[in-house]
Amino acid sequence: MTDPALPPHMRPDRSFQALLLTLQRFWADQGCVILQPYDMEVGAGTFHPATTLRALGPRPWKAAYVQPSRRPKDGRYGENPNRLQHYYQFQVILKPSPENLQELYLKSLEAIGIDLRLHDVRFVEDDWESPTLGAWGLGWECWCDGMEVSQFTYFQQVAGFECAPVAGELTYGLERLAMYVQGVENVYDLNFNGREGDEKTTYGDVFLQAEQEYSRHNFEAADTDMLFEQFRMAEAACRKYLAFGDKGDTHQMVLPAYDQCIKASHVFNLLDARGVISVTERQSYILRVRELAKACGAAWLKTDAGGREAA
Amino acid sequence: MPDLLLELFSEEIPARMQAQAAEALRKLVTDKLVERGLIYEGAKAFVTPRRLALSVHGLPGRQADQKEEKKGPRVGAPEAALQGFLKGAGLSSIDQATIQSDPKKGDFYVAVIEKKGLPTPDVIAEIIPEIVRSFPWPKSMRWGPDSAKPGSLKWVRPLHSIVATFGAEGDEPEVVHFSVDGIEASNVTRGHRFMAPAPFTVKRLDDWMAKLEAAKVVADRDRRKQIILNDAKDLALAAGLELVEDEGLLDEVCGLVEWPVVLMGSFEERFLDIPDEVIRATIRANQKCFVLRNPETGRLANRFLLVSNLVASDGGKAIVAGNERVIRARLSDAKFFWDTDRVNGLASRLPKFAHITFHEKLGSQAERIERIRRLAVELAPKVGAPAALAEEAALVAKADLLTEVVGEFPELQGLMGRYYAEGEKLPPEVAAACEDHYKPQGPNDRVPTAPVSVAVALADKIDTLVGFWAIDEKPTGSKDPYALRRAALGVIRIVLENGLKLRLRETILEAGEIFRLWKINSYFNFDNNIRVPYVLNSRGDYSVIPEYASDGIGFSDWPFIHAASTDLDIFDEIFSAKAFKVEKNGNLYLEVVKNPDTVSRVFSWSNLDSDLLAFFADRLKVYLRDRGARHDLVDAVFALEGQDDLLLVVRRVEALGRFLDTEDGKTLLAGYRRAVNILRIEEKKDGRAFTGPTNAALLKEPAEEHLAAAIEDVKARVTKAVAAEDFAAAMTALADLRAPVDAFFDAVTVNDKDAALRENRLKLLDEIRAATRTIADFDLIQG
């Protein structure tokens, strides 16, 4: 339950940022390293190397972070109360998955003010798959009173490699969760800073203009020639860096290579939003990104963090 | 007799897997018990989102002891043989063996090996871990630290604890001790995740059920369903509404709760502008809630029923409010889709189909629609539909696939097409065809009856069949990925149930021709990436259409080839050539060097019609057999040449069946067989066939004269009746052969000493065969 001693602006049911801070705090208490967002455009928190790469190999890992996520196709020019082309995911990754992961998750909901005696929380089958990352896992979407508020996944495979051990991944859709606990129907009405009156800043104050501009950009203006070129360059660079770092048994340049894989993936999403990729081409682009992700995964397993020495 | 209680307690099991898993557990455990000689009285499996359980009652306390006699060597056999026997039988000295006497073999040793039966719990402890490790989940996973080890346990979701107890009623049951990957079996379980999370111990089934019930878990899946259904109906009744029952949804939601609590919510009336089916699909698919009907209007009410898993401290207010929020948002989306879809007409979506592949080898959806359009126009007059309406319907019938609502809810395809067509005031026949051209989807689905719907439905299905036949993707065994059997059955039902007279071969050939034109066209346009503007006129001249010169040719603008067969022959040559040029008046219009791969991809057309007709005959047999008709009669009729009018085939089969049930029919069939037997023997003997007209001068006996006359007469009448499609009359006529045939066999010896008479009589027998051939091939009739 929410700490009654908190000042109003720090209550997760009053303030978007307080919700985020509460989750960070909660998972810090569980021993996670609290990371900051990855400094690149990604489609989901899973792309952060702290998840994709760290899920591979034997070394234990616990991390939590917020990740701005870009879905160019979901832009609605700021006119849809629920859809955004840029939104926040809160991501938790625990490797190996702890025995009580479900309980920890439910406690985190309580921490942000969801009373489990009042609300109907359900784990509804949802198998997760990321074709671009060559990853899949089993788990659920977590429902609170019929609304999907999180994704809960036991990673089985990432970048085409079996996860050994398996990591548990939690992804909270922060805007949705905040709308629920704040009782708001339109995302742009969310109270961002928890203040009232003149001091109040809404989600719309922060992001509405960006949603409008980026929707225009994603659907109308994004320079497709440049993007095709960028895709090609990112793909080539990824391969180049992987080749550069490959020392046989060890690898010395995975992370910079993986950055290019992320870049290729985002550029593909932009091209897709512009509608310049046909159905058949689409599959082949996805495949090309997956090949990069797989190569990065293979390289990662040859690094220290990938467990080369521990193995 | 003691009982076994087994409970596998895990994280949430997907609803769709639960029922099957319970059945699998019951079968696996009981089979293994029986295999080990443990016969039980009964078994029942239970499943909730978090537990899979089984009670096996009436088990013996232990396996029966087993006595096995092992024969050994003769008394006085060499030491090595004795030692081998002792070792094999597990004896320490030969004194432990008994000696038996046999009159032939003399005295020899016998070891009686007693195998003590194991206590049942030991057997259970052995078999359960095996079953857990190899449980047939559709998808299973690893978890936790152990998942780093090879061969670690897999389960549908993390498995947390196992209850295994064994004991008779009244006794304190014992825990069956075993462990699976570190999970020790015990007698401890837990109740509802939120309402009773504390662990508690259980004994046998009744105790387990009662304690779970107290801990807010209804273990029996059927009871949960019953509770949901009853409560839902009560709540609906109290609000003056009716529950729209939904068995599939009920199955799913009972797998999402351990303690069902049904609650009613509502949404704004304004959403009732959306068609009921869309509201229902929205609420069902996304929220897994039931909808309610207003019995006065027959339309949906602005209420829904949700099934929660919690007795909430506020009576469910927050839960209802939360669900209402989500449903409001979902319905807003649905309304937005519904409104957006109606801004532009269905036809406005057609160009997009050019970019959607129907099948790699069968072209885009646009090309497919174009083929269906052409075939529908051909079919229209044959099914009594105005060609223009059939054409319009074929063009827009699939357009709803590109609407937002159908994108969201594919199961509403067709229905939405009808709504949108009605909305934009397309002719009602066109609107109906949008919905009905998909039908019938299965043996129990409704068959379209309106002529325009029928034309499009037939065109759609026949195009599909011909297409997949042409690229050799026919169904094999249990594999039928494109549902071609269903398509053929659809054609059969549409034809028969509407009493349509349709020559299938002709229709197939028409569809084939349309395919060929399309293929030729698409070959030039796409296969070689050559954008070839051309037409071929009826004289075989090529000329260039200027407006196509700059760009490719769109689907709606096929450079139409006037289908004189000579023109198509030219194209066949082009297909088989490796390169060709088109010159006219000394100008080179076109030079194509073909890629050998594409050349080999030309359709195989040989026997398309007879091959596909045979498939139809097969499906028709299945269809008629399901309706109690004799499949041998279908074979007997199809064996005749040119049987491609399904309606006539069926009517002929029916008339034949009725005839064969009569005394006349049975006797005539017997006479026919007698004639054919004699013929067969004599033809073999002489190494020749006896066909051809009989010689009237050689008809000496009155009975044979009489028969010859009767055959003449009957053949004429049968032929006439068949031509008039009056099969009952044909059978009546055929029946008149019975008496003369019988009389003939009574009075006349076929194998007369006079060779000329014999030959003439054998020819007469052949005439009997020929006469029946106007009806069916009697050789194929069984029984």
Image (cartoon, coloured by chain):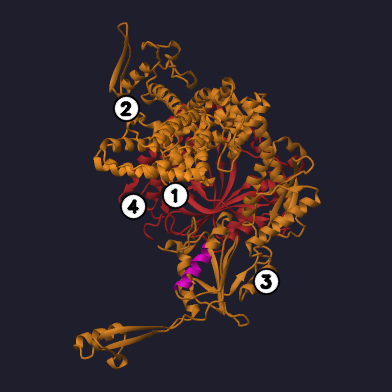
Please give the residue where the numbered disc 1 appears in the rendered image. Answer: B783
- Which of labels 3 and 2 is toward the front? 2
Q: CA distance from mark 1 to mark 2?
A: 51 Å
- Which of labels 3 and 4 is toward the front? 3
Please give the residue where the numbered disc 4 appears in the rendered image. Answer: A250
**Where, by quadrant of the figure, is residue A308 drawn?**
bottom left
Q: Amino acid at mark 2?
A: Val
**Where, by quadrant of the figure, is residue B396 drawn?**
top right
Same chain assignment for discs 4 and 1: no
Residues marked 4 and 2 touching at CB (< 8 Å): no
Estimate how packed mark 2 is, as few (under 14), some (14 to 19) or many (20 or more) residues with alpha carbons within 10 Å. Answer: some
Q: Is residue B563 above or below residue B684?
A: above
Q: Earlier in the sequence, mark 3 or mark 2?
A: 3
Which residue extends farthest top? B585
Please give the residue where the numbered disc 2 appears in the rendered image. Answer: B599
- Which of labels 4 and 2 is toward the front? 2
- Which of labels 3 and 1 is toward the front? 1
Q: Which mark is residue B210?
A: 3
Q: Magenta stretch: dominant SS?
A: helix
- B702 in magenta: no
Magenta-highlighted residues: B24-35
> How many numbered tags mark residues here?
4
Which chain has been coloured orange in this picture? B
Q: Amino acid at mark 1?
A: Gly
Residues marked 3 and 2 touching at CB (< 8 Å): no
Q: Chain of mark 2?
A: B
Q: Chain of mark 4?
A: A
Q: Chain of mark 3?
A: B
**Secondary-structure class at tag 4:** strand
